[in-house]
């Protein structure tokens, strides 16, 4: 039964205070427990990382899974090559080394493809120059390596055109017209004025301007055969670097 | 002997002289490299433009139906001349001599080979060089006595070798030095 009057109010107040106290206690207990769990978890993760060090280094799928597991709990094994993770796994160096190789491939192929390279093609070339004995790399590794050097402001960016991921090693913005043409060219590897007219219904002026800029940027090569002009996107051509 | 063409050989725009300057430079460079390795493999030392056009598979790709016209072949050969890998034999630019490697490239190759094989400080005869172990190596295919002589003269100038002459060419010898 509820009491009324001053005594009742005082009792209510006391009850609230007690509840608060208990609540705080519970909360700090939970926090403690959680912290202990996190410490334990980190320990376990370290043990895990040490135990599967070789798998992480050698198996690209395993590495990717490990990476995403770490990211989901807010641990970044790449944060520093001198940090704990770097020392255990040596992964920091792995990505820096890969980044240097990516830069080399991109620069060397620039005059051929205008500084645009498809990520799978890049992976193939990287695998080739790294040799058979080197650790196998995945597209995910390439993305991570590039993120690693982002801080240097190297002007490398990953752009998506259709379902193709491309690495751009020249600092520039591709406008929407250029991107549309690059997307259209994915069908056959090249485009022609006629094809653009049919599919995108652009004016001749707009088509010519876009194609000219693609040639100027070195992204497209012209194929002039029997009066028929086709514009090939260099980086769509398989094996272009082999 | 069959020649393994690189992938760029099947790229249709490779047969159109590119309008973009940077792209064109790269294209000509690739043509020169391709042509030189082709000539080396097929042991071609002279070439006639008018006889090659439409016939030599180097310049004619039947699979993708593209070919270099006479003019374009001349552009490639002109580039090779510029690099010192070819020489026109007539004013009309039809016949062309091909040097697979420039003399100083041969010189470097020979010296490296001698060094790697521990032949520095010992005397080898020309005959040994042209018919012995060195001639079995792929990269020395097509090295003749004239070229050898010119390459060795370069090494002499670089003080990396000394030439000993005998009474006839079979007795010509060379000593490689440690540099």
Image: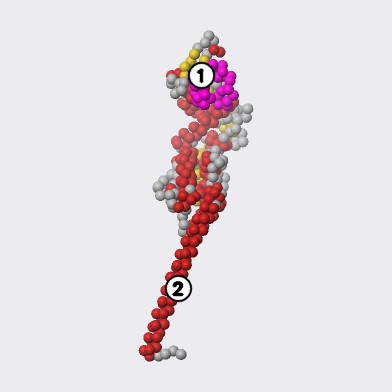
Up/down of A32 relative to A163, above or below: below
The C terminus of chain A, quarter of image: top right
Q: Which mark is residue B154?
A: none
Model colouring: secondary structure
Secondary structure beneath label 2: helix
The percent position of residue A212, horizontal first and vertical second, equals: 46, 42
Question: Local crowd at mark 1 within 10 Å, few (<14), some, or many (≥20)?
Answer: few
Q: Chain of mark 1?
A: B
> Would residue B113 be counted in the magenta stretch?
yes
Res A114 seen here: no
The percent position of residue B115, horizontal first and vertical second, equals: 50, 25
The percent position of residue A41, horizontal first and vertical second, equals: 50, 61
| Magenta part, dominant SS | helix
- What residue is shown with label 2? A26
Query: Label 1 vs label 2: CA separation?
Result: 89 Å
Name the residue rendered at 40%, 86% in the picture: A11
Res A42 seen here: yes
Up/down of B92 relative to A137, above or below: above
> Which portion, as a residue range, is magenta?
B111-140
CB-based contact (under 8 Å), mark 1 and mark 2: no
Name the residue rendered at 48%, 59% in the picture: A42
Q: Chain of mark 2?
A: A
Residue B5 figure quarter: top right
Secondary structure beneath label 1: loop
Q: Residue furthest top?
A: B167
Name the residue rendered at 56%, 41% in the picture: A133
The percent position of residue A50, horizontal first and vertical second, equals: 52, 52
Name the residue rendered at 40%, 47% in the picture: A152
| Disc 1 with disc 2 on a shared chain | no
- What residue is shown with label 1? B122
Up/down of B23 relative to A50, above or below: above
């Amino acid at each position: 039964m509820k009491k009324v009057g001053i005594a009742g109010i005082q009792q209510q107040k006391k009850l609230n205070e007690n509840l608060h106290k208990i609540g705080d206690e519970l909360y700090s207990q939970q926090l403690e427990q959680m912290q202990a769990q996190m410490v334990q978890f980190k320990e376990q993760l370290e043990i895990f990382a040490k135990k599967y060090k070789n798998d992480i280094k050698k198996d690209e799928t395993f590495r990717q899974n490990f990476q995403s597991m770490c990211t989901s709990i807010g641990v970044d094994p790449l944060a520093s090559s001198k940090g704990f993770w770097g020392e255990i796994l040596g992964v920091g160096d792995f990505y820096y080394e890969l980044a240097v190789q990516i830069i080399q491939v991109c620069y060397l192929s620039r005059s051929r493809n205008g500084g645009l390279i498809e990520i799978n093609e890049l992976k193939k070339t990287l695998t080739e120059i790294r040799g058979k004995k080197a650790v196998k790399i995945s597209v995910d590794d390439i993305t991570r390596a590039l993120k690693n050097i982002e801080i240097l402001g190297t002007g490398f960016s990953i752009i998506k055109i259709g379902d193709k991921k491309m690495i751009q090693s020249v600092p520039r913005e591709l406008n929407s017209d250029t991107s549309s043409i690059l997307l259209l060219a994915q069908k056959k590897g090249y485009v022609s004025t006629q094809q653009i007219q049919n599919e995108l219904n652009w004016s001749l002026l707009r088509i010519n301007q876009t194609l000219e800029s693609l040639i100027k940027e070195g992204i497209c090569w012209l194929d002039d055969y029997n009066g028929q002009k086709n514009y090939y996107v260099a980086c769509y051509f398989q094996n272009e670097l082999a | 002997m069959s020649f393994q063409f690189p992938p760029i050989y099947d790229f249709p725009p490779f047969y159109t002289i590119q309008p973009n300057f940077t792209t064109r430079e790269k294209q000509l460079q690739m043509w020169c490299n391709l042509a030189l390795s082709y000539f080396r493999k097929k042991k071609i030392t002279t070439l006639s433009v008018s006889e090659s056009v439409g016939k030599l598979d180097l310049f004619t790709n039947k699979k993708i139906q593209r070919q270099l016209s006479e003019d374009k072949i001349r552009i490639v050969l002109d580039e090779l001349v510029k690099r010192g890998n070819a020489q026109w034999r007539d004013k009309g630019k039809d016949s062309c001599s091909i040097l697979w490697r420039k003399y100083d490239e041969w010189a470097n190759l020979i010296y490296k080979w001698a060094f790697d094989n521990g032949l520095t400080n010992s005397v080898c005869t020309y005959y040994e060089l042209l018919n012995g172990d060195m001639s079995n190596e792929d990269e020395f295919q097509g090295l003749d006595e004239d070229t050898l002589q010119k390459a060795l003269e370069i090494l002499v100038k670089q003080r990396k070798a000394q030439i000993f002459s005998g009474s006839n060419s079979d007795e010509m010898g060379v000593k490689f030095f440690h540099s």
